[in-house]
Image (cartoon, grey):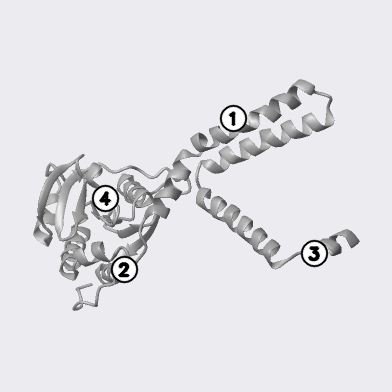
């Protein structure tokens, strides 16, 4: 007990800050991999490492001790390969510009565009026509746009209703909106691999979450089965929205002034 008291007495502000930074780093890593397959991988790596260290310390295994000591550099090289998806996601989030640098993309997405999208989504939900509309942010979505049909047309309620009308050639894919233009339709998006998602979520919802995990885009989804309106952003989803709540969410994210009331 006296040794611990002595250690605490010798702690300086620099030592406390050092401990805090290390703890914050581990917390950020654990938060990043929470709910992903990396958790099981990390448990497996730690279990093998601890078992090998205990065995080499308690048992007279000279060869095993030598192998563990020389395997550390190889393990440091293997870790980025094993946790490549999580590291990539972290770097992409770090590389996204903050709110000050996102002003250009937000200015391009005008209030009239949001109004047209919300009106179209409301009509699609009323008729239970499935839809997935992705609003491009600062991260370019050109590779995904090229999987569909390039339109480069003005955003309008009529255009979106036409695209997602059942039976049309493009209604199954996603629409990507860049600024005030519908960049492409019928696009294929990456599905989220998060195992903690509800099993009831269909392909559209998983694609909406997937694209927001890999970019700073926002995705609006209309369920074909229930007509429920959802919004995905930063890998998370808000469900059971109506037109008014959808407009409020979009105006909050894109910092738009309130527009005249929309029908419920």
Q: Earlier in the sequence, mark 4 or mark 3?
A: 3
**Residue 47 left/right relative to 171:** right
Which circle marks residue 10 in the picture?
Answer: 3
Mark closer to the chain start, 2 or 4: 4
Mark 4 and mark 3 residues within 8 Å of each other at the beta carbon? no
> Residue placed at 25% from the left, 73% from the top?
256
Q: Nearer the viewer, mark 4 or mark 1?
A: 1
Give residue 9's position: percent from left, percent from top. Answer: 81, 67
Q: Earlier in the sequence, mark 1 or mark 2?
A: 1
**Residue at figure coordinates x 13%, y 59% from the top left:** 155
Residue contact between numbered discs 3 and 1, judged by CB atoms under 8 Å: no
Q: Disc 4 or disc 3, which is closer to the eye?
A: 3
Picture quadrant of residue 145: top left
Specify the label residue 74 is tagged with: 1
Q: CA distance from mark 1 to mark 2?
A: 47 Å
Which is more foreground, mark 2 or mark 4?
A: 4
**Relative depth, front residue between 114 and 165:** 114
């Amino acid at each position: 007990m006296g040794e611990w008291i002595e250690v605490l007495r010798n702690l300086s502000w620099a030592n406390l800050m050092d401990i805090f930074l290390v703890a914050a780093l581990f917390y950020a890593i654990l938060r990043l991999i929470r709910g992903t397959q990396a958790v099981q991988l990390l448990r497996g790596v730690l279990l093998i490492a601890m078992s090998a260290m205990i065995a080499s310390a308690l048992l007279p295994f000279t060869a095993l001790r030598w192998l563990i000591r020389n395997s550390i550099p190889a393990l440091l090289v293997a870790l980025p390969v094993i946790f490549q998806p999580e590291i990539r996601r972290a770097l992409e989030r770090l590389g996204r510009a903050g709110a000050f640098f996102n002003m250009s993309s937000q200015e391009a997405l005008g209030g009239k565009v949001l109004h047209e999208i919300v009106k179209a989504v409301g009509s699609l939900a009323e008729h239970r026509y499935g839809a997935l509309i992705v609003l491009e942010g600062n991260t370019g979505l050109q590779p995904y746009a090229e999987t569909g049909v390039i339109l480069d047309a003005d955003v309008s309620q009529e255009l979106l209703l036409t695209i997602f009308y059942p039976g049309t050639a493009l209604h199954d894919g996603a629409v990507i909106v860049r600024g005030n233009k519908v960049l492409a339709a019928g696009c294929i998006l990456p599905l989220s691999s998060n195992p903690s998602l509800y099993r009831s979520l269909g392909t559209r919802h998983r694609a909406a979450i997937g694209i927001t995990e890999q970019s700073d885009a926002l995705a609006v989804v209309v369920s074909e089965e229930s007509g429920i309106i959802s919004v995905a952003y930063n890998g998370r989803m808000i469900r059971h929205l109506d037109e008014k709540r959808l407009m409020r969410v979009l105006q909050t994210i894109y910092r738009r002034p309130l527009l005249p009331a929309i029908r419920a």
